[in-house]
């Protein structure tokens, strides 16, 4: 008796809470599948994270492209120094020298052929008390252009081009990964939408089942009072009422949880009020679609699946690494060329007599004349030559090429393995569509027959030819048949969503998915070619 009282009190509390909720209904949003998908694509933070990953890859492409950016450098300075006398002609006085100088230049790596060019201009004004100097002050200027062109190694593929090609490919892979995430998010939204639709339908089924049990309990109560049925029948029916009320509570909780899962997928994180909005799923499941041609779908997916495209990009990246290290094993042969024009002017000291002579006057020439000499043919200097270098023995590039070859074979094997996974998953998904469609038809027929059986059993009970136990059993059978029908309908819709998504992307969380791993980009400033000149004995190369 205590248990019965407790159950009735709990039911009263639940009913009171439900009444309180009904007095202040929450705001409602009529939501179609298309609206839910649109909201998810616009607001889902997980998609935003993947989109930012794509932006990171775009930045890496910019980093790799910076290797071809012209490099400008300039120096402006002044220096003064006094050197001790190292010559008898200097006496005991030191030699003081003062310089005001500047140097400006531009150098750049050429994206075609991977050569490097540079252009620079130097200017200086020097004062000195050395008796050996012919100018005081002296003005100097020089202009130089140089070009270095690899002829074997680095001509077709150097490190800058390798980084750029791989970065561009990784950017394409990140875009594919974003599309893949969109497909997975859309599938998750559709799954959540139809699940919420089914669970709310289950709440209605559970409510109707509870109403039938309560109606039977009322009829049994009347029969027990008039002596037509034993009290045990009423106890059995009231037990059934309590069990169905518990099922209804669980069904409502499951529907609320499902609604929150859908909210999580489609809501704007900045809109906290969205948690209090009731989602009204207004779309109904469509009828059976024609069964798919699985073999044709599999053949198309081999070219259209985003993860397969990304895996093939990984194979191409590995092949690029093989090409790069194979090229690095070749001799480094470079064509070096340069041209330099020089000008000299200032206050030229005119001397007479024996060395070092006596200064008798000066001949002044301005900086304009110096520039004329610099860009003219007064003091030209040019160079043209070839440099060759080659490691003796097994080099770093040899080992790296072996490693790159293994990685390329691994990437190719992953593509082959992924193709098998794609075919197997799509074939299984196609069978799932077919089997769930058949299950839905069978469950619909079962629910119809269960309803007919309950109607017949209820009529027999009304005329005294049946018992409350048999009616209760028929109600249970109808409830189970209706739940089975809802589950079969949900499974069919889920199988359609899954089959559609698998044609473009793997299932979310699949262990066989290929992940984009952005390669690091190393800053590669262009070298400064200076031409090639004969090394004098004792000088540093």
Image (cartoon, rainbow, N blue to C red):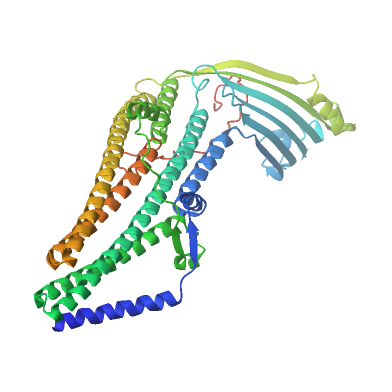
Q: Is residue 293 above or below residue 377?
A: below
Q: Is residue 518 above or below residue 31?
A: above
Residue at 76% x, 37% y is 124
Residue 486 in picture, x, y percent from top left: 30, 53
Residue closer to the observer: 303 or 370: 303
Residue 139 in picture, x, y percent from top left: 80, 34
Residue closer to the observer: 178 or 397: 178
Q: Is residue 426 above or below residue 182?
A: above
Say left or right for 200 vs 330: left
Q: Is residue 491 above or below residue 153?
A: below
Residue closer to the observer: 478 or 81: 478
Residue at 22% x, 57% y is 478
Answer yes or no: is residue 282 visible: yes
Answer yes or no: is residue 514 visible: no
Residue 329, image quadrant = top left
Residue 173, image quadrant = top left
Residue 138, image quadrant = top right
Residue 487 in picture, x, y percent from top left: 28, 51
Residue closer to the observer: 192 or 230: 230
- The image quadrant where one finds the N terminus is bottom left
Say left or right for 426 vs 31: left
């Amino acid at each position: 008796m205590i248990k019965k009282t407790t159950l009735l009190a709990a039911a009263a509390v639940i009913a009171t809470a439900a009444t309180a909720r009904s007095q202040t209904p929450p705001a409602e949003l009529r939501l179609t599948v298309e609206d839910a998908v649109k909201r998810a694509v616009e607001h889902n933070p997980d998609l935003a994270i993947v989109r930012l990953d794509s932006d990171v890859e775009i930045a890496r492409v910019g980093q790799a492209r910076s290797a071809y950016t012209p490099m400008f450098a300039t120096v402006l300075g002044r220096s003064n120094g006094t050197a001790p006398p190292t010559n008898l002609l200097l006496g005991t006085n030191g030699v003081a020298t003062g310089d005001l100088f500047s140097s400006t230049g531009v150098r750049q790596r050429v994206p075609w052929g991977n050569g490097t060019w540079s252009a620079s201009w130097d200017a200086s004004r020097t004062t000195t008390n050395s008796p050996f100097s012919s100018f005081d002050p002296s003005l100097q200027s020089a202009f130089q252009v140089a070009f270095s062109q690899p002829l074997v190694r680095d001509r077709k593929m150097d490190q800058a081009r390798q980084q750029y090609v791989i970065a561009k490919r990784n950017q394409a892979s990140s875009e594919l990964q974003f599309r893949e995430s969109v497909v997975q998010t859309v599938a998750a939204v559709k799954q959540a939408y139809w699940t919420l639709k089914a669970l709310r339908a289950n709440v209605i089924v559970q409510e109707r089942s509870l109403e039938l049990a309560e109606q039977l309990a009322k009829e049994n109560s009347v029969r027990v009072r008039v002596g037509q049925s034993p009290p045990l029948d009423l106890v059995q029916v009231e037990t059934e009422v309590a069990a169905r009320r518990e099922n209804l509570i669980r069904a409502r909780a499951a529907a609320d949880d499902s609604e929150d899962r859908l909210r999580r997928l489609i809501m704007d994180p900045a809109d906290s009020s969205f948690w209090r909005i009731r989602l009204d799923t207004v779309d109904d499941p469509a009828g059976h679609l024609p069964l798919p041609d699985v073999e044709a779908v599999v053949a198309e997916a081999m070219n259209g699946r985003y993860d397969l495209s990304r895996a093939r990009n990984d194979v191409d990246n590995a092949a690029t690494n093989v090409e790069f290290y194979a090229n690095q094993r070749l001799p480094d042969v470079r064509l070096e060329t340069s041209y330099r024009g020089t000008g000299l002017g200032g206050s030229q000291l005119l001397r007479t007599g024996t060395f070092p002579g006596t200064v008798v006057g000066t001949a002044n020439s301005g900086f304009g004349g110096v520039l004329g000499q610099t860009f003219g043919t007064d003091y030209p200097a040019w160079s043209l030559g070839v440099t060759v270098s080659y490691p003796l023995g097994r080099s770093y590039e040899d080992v790296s090429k072996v490693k790159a070859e293994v990685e390329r074979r691994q990437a190719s094997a992953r593509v082959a393995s992924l193709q098998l996974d794609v075919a197997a998953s799509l074939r299984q998904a196609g069978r799932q569509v077919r089997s769930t469609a058949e299950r839905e038809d069978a469950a619909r027929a079962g629910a119809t027959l269960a309803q007919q059986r309950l109607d017949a059993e209820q009529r027999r009970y009304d005329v005294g030819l049946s018992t409350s136990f048999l009616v209760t059993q028929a109600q249970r059978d109808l409830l189970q048949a209706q739940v089975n029908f809802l589950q079969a309908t949900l499974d069919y819709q889920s199988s359609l969503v899954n089959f559609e998504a698998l044609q473009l992307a793997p299932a979310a969380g699949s262990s066989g998915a290929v992940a984009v791993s952005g390669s690091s980009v190393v800053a590669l400033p262009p070298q400064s070619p200076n031409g090639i000149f004969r090394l004098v004995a004792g000088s540093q190369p």
